[in-house]
Amino acid sequence: MPTRLSANLNAVAMLRNRRDLPWPSVVGIGRIALAAGAAGLTVHPRPDQRHIRFSDLADLRALIDAEFPGAEFNIEGYPTPEFLDLALSVRPEQVTLVPDHPSQPTSDHGWDFAASRDILAPVVRRLKGEGARVSIFADPDPAGFECAAELGAERLELYTGPYGATHGDPQAAIRELERLGKAGDAAHRLGLGLNAGHDLTVENLPPLIARLPFIAEVSIGHALTAEALEHGMAGAVRRFIDACA
Ligand SMILES: CC(=O)[C@@H](O)[C@H](O)COP(=O)(O)O
Ligand SMILES: NCC(=O)COP(=O)(O)O
């Protein structure tokens, strides 16, 4: 099964929110991405709605249901009661749990599984009980993976930010890639499905897929949007699908 691309629309929403205008349309760009071959859409509705607005979720669900019934909706966020209610209100195929504080400028670490077990256990039960696949954002450190498996998560999303940060430093990239490789192998041995994301690009994605060909899904937003400014969103999606091959 080839690695699927989920188009993250956060950056499109950030551009939309610069003015009190409805363009660029998050739904319109999501439609282009799905029509170009993205397997799904990802959003990270943060509490301050700095980019994705809570109202975007129902609009994107309606798009998928009406025009792309086989596509998946992946919603990321910290599992507050408000986030869980919002996410589950649109019947997502997947929810990715991310340990972000509201003040964080972006996601920059995975869960401390042992310390967060009491937070995560009831959340995983509720999400799975309502039909969502659960993916948990994880640093590439196998120490907590057995705990993640015991929690019942179907997948881990490997945080690839440090790998993305090695651009221009090939030796560092090799080191980070091997760290990701060992972590991915460990998750695979535990029977955990594997997603990956954060600062992936058309350049750094092929070596990651070659090292971890069983990655089920990569969710990509920042570099996808940057590529879209140059190649259009359809062209950017195709470039990333080629990079996943
Ligand atoms: C969890 C993760 O690494 C990203 O998916 C996240 O969505 C990035 O959030 P921002 O787009 O707000 O930086
Ligand atoms: N989970 C990663 C994601 O959805 C997008 O991250 P990025 O490509 O915007 O860094």
Image: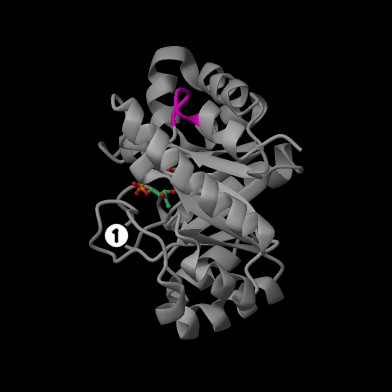
**Which secondary structure class fits the magenta region best?**
loop
- Percent across and percent down for residue 227 are 42, 21
Q: Can residue 23 be seen in this view?
A: no
Residue at 40% across, 14% down: 230
Q: Does the residue labelled 1 lie within 8 Å of ligand 1?
A: no
Q: Which amino acid does label 1 sit on?
A: Asp
Say if 159 sits above or below 211 in the image.
below
Q: Which of 225 and 164 is in front in this view?
A: 164
Q: What element carries label 1?
A: loop
Say if 83 sits above or below 7 in the image.
below
Q: How is the image coloured?
A: one colour
The part of the image, by quadrant, that contains residue 242 is top right
What residue occupies the far bottom of the structure in this picture? 118
Residue at 50% across, 22% down: 233
What residue occupies the far top of the structure in this picture? 231
The part of the image, by quadrant, that contains residue 151 is bottom right
Residue at 57% across, 46% down: 60
Left or right: residue 57 compared with residue 125: left
In the rendered image, the quadrant that contains the C terminus is top right
What's drawn in magenta, residue-wise?
201-205
Left or right: residue 45 compared with residue 196: left
Decide: few, some or many residues near mark 1? Use Cα within 10 Å; few <14, some 14-19, many ≥20: few
Marker count (numbered): 1
The part of the image, by quadrant, that contains residue 174 is top left
Residue at 46% across, 72% down: 79
- Percent across and percent down for residue 215 are 63, 44
The verdict on residue 191 being magenta is no
Say if 10 sits above or below 104 in the image.
above
The residue where tag 1 is placed is: 48
In the rendered image, the quadrant that contains the N terminus is top right
